[in-house]
Amino acid sequence: MSAPIVTGLMAYGMSGRIFHAPFISTNPGFTLKAIVERHEKKAANIYPDILSYNSIDELLNDDEIELIIVNTPSNLHFEHAMMAMKAGKHVLLEKPAAATSAEVKQLFDTARQLNKHLMVYQNRRYDSGFLSTKKVIESGRLGNLIEVTFRMDRYKAAIGVKAFKETKGVPAGGLVYDLGAHLIDNTIALFGRPLSFHKTTGIYREGSEVPDYFHYHLIYPNQLNVYLTSGLQIAGDTPGFWVNGTLGSFIKNRSDVQEAQLDKGMMPTDPAYGVEPAGNEGQLTIVNIDNEKCVETVPSVKGDYNQIFDAVYHTIRNDALYPITEEHIAWQLELLEA
């Protein structure tokens, strides 16, 4: 393996603490050198050798750092990614990459001009439920697909404390840009760009300024219908993954354990990391040649966000194609900003 990629984090909030620092600190392809902590200095409690900078400028002026993870509030993603690339850094950019398709194009054009890698972080491609569903679809056991439904629901009636997500007029705010970016990326990873789509949004929480519900109906070739839904006032348990084909159906709850494990301090190197507990298996129903329904449980594929960091390493060190491509992000923004 080539030398580890010296990396800096722009923030150490929930995203930095859970989704980035544990991987950069344990993956041999990286060295976690510095984190921006504007207020409380917490990172050193877990990473005693870390440098804690007071500002983004200090981080960008560190000549040893090659890769910057832009995990600041979503309305600042475009600005901060541009700053990092112009400072000579490769960038791993949290979703949503930007607020508009025009901004996304400008980001990737700048990366090409400066000969830097711009990579968008879409970790939900490596959730257990998505990987399990993808495996079943690719097996062909469902026949020709008729409909696919992906959901990410919450019950959070109160307005959140993160103003950039909850304030009308703030770019890249609201539920569509937050959870919609995940569901759309899951769909694009499997099926590519839709032929057409219809988008519905709604506001249901008292006092909300931004949509807290959305539904997409995407049309694909061969009469495939894909439905993406999310709401912040959905109290019941809804399946995260539901696929119907001409030969059978697959249903799976959204029970990936990685976020909860990381939040409790488990590191990705732990053998239990990413393994869903028993009882969360998917259910596959197949109609056999005698027109009988045969039901079987499908073991959950281990979730593994480390795959995205391995991809970042090989993109920077070996110039490999990053799996979340520029086209994927451009198609995503078409749907988000519609």
Image (tube, rainbow, N blue to C red):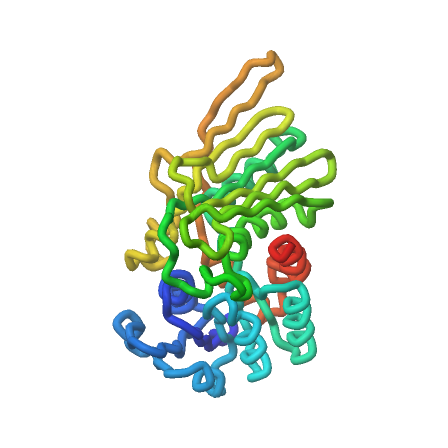
- Residue 17 position, x and y percent, is 36, 65
Residue 311 seen in the current view: no
198 or 33: which is nearer to us? 198
Vertical placement of residue 63 versus 235, above or below: below
* Quadrant in which residue 40 is drawn: bottom left
Q: Residue at x 65, y 42 (%)?
A: 218
Q: Quadrant of the C terminus?
A: bottom right
Q: Nearer the viewer, residue 211 or 331?
A: 211
Figure label count: 0
Residue 200 percent location from the top left of the image: 59, 45
Farthest-out residue, left: 45
Q: Residue furthest front?
A: 207
The percent coordinates of residue 81 (x first, y second) are 55, 74
Considering only vertical position in the picture, is 314 above or below 60?
A: above
Left or right of 281 on screen, residue 324: right
- Toward the viewer: 230 or 36? 230
Q: Residue at x 44, y 44 (%)?
A: 153
- Can residue 18 be seen here? The reply is yes
Q: Position of residue 272 (x, y in %)?
A: 33, 49
- Residue at figure coordinates x 66%, y 56% from the top left: 334
Instruction: Using residue 195 as the reference point, say whether residue 127 is left or right of it.
Output: left
Left or right: 330 as drawn, with respect to 131? right
